[in-house]
Amino acid sequence: MTFDYNSTRSKLILAEYGRNVQNMVAHICTLPTKDERNRHALAVIDLMGFLNPHLRDVADFKHKLWDHLQIISDFKIDVDSPYPIPTADVLNVKPEALAYPQKRIRYKHYGKTVEVLIAQAKEIEDPERKQLMVQSIANFMKMAYVTWNKDSVTDETIIQDLKELSNGELALEDNVNLNKVDVRPAPSSIRPKGMQKNNLQNNKNRQNSNNRNGSNRPKNPGKRY
């Protein structure tokens, strides 16, 4: 008696369609006439769409199903596809290498986004629109500063940093006040690991202290027998 294990089966090419669909496609490849292959291929295409309804939200999802049919058959199925038939080369195309930024960020707590916004604000010709853009950048800088620093920051510091980052080309009007920002630490999910560890240790020490002081004991323990 022999057992049928996955380790002894052929490789499952597209797991989201399952082995039954792959076996159906393999059977279609063995049919003698193209009319039979076309009829069975249409039925399998409908089944593939039924098994993966999320593909219906993808643009031109029928085209994707026919491409997947070719991939499952290892590009050996001979049917009349309503779309251009892909080749095996499309699966082995190497993605282009990402160009990593090489420029240094002057103030890391403001981030690269502030430098990009400042560069765009310099190109605005309308004075009123430019001043609104500068004020929005300054408010964002103040929020970013407080997010990554426990101390509050004065408007003068933000104005000076804005002037330095823009090489003196951008400045706020004298009567403009920046929005107030609460001094709050960064969320625990983005705090440095050392800060998270210290907070966990502090909570553990506080709990141990409460246990020693009897704060967790019931107020009315009742009579013991």
Image (cartoon, helix red, strand yellow):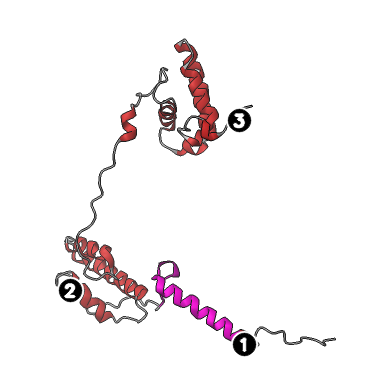
Instruction: Name which residue lies at 49% across and 23% down.
Output: 25
Q: Nearer the viewer, mark 3 or mark 1?
A: 3
Q: What is the C-alpha distance between the residues marked 2 and 1?
A: 54 Å
Quarter occupied by residue 78: top left
Quarter occupied by residue 86: top left
Q: Is residue 220 at least partly visible in the picture?
A: yes
- Point out residue 209 in the picture as x, y percentages from the top left corner: 57, 86
Q: Is residue 185 magenta?
A: yes
The amino acid beneath tag 3 is: Phe
Quarter occupied by residue 215: bottom right
The N terminus sits in image quarter: top right
Q: Which residue is mark 3?
A: 3
Mark 3 / mark 2, whichever is N-terminal? 3
The C terminus sits in image quarter: bottom right
Q: Which residues are magenta?
A: 184-210
Is 155 on the left or on the right of 66, as rendered?
Answer: left
Residue found farthest to the top: 33
- Point out residue 128 in the picture as x, y percentages from the top left corner: 22, 66
- Point out residue 15 in the picture as x, y percentages from the top left corner: 49, 36
Q: Contact, CB < 8 Å: mark 3 with mark 1?
A: no
- Residue 164's label in the rendered image is 2
Instruction: Name which residue lies at 32% across and 35% down.
Output: 92
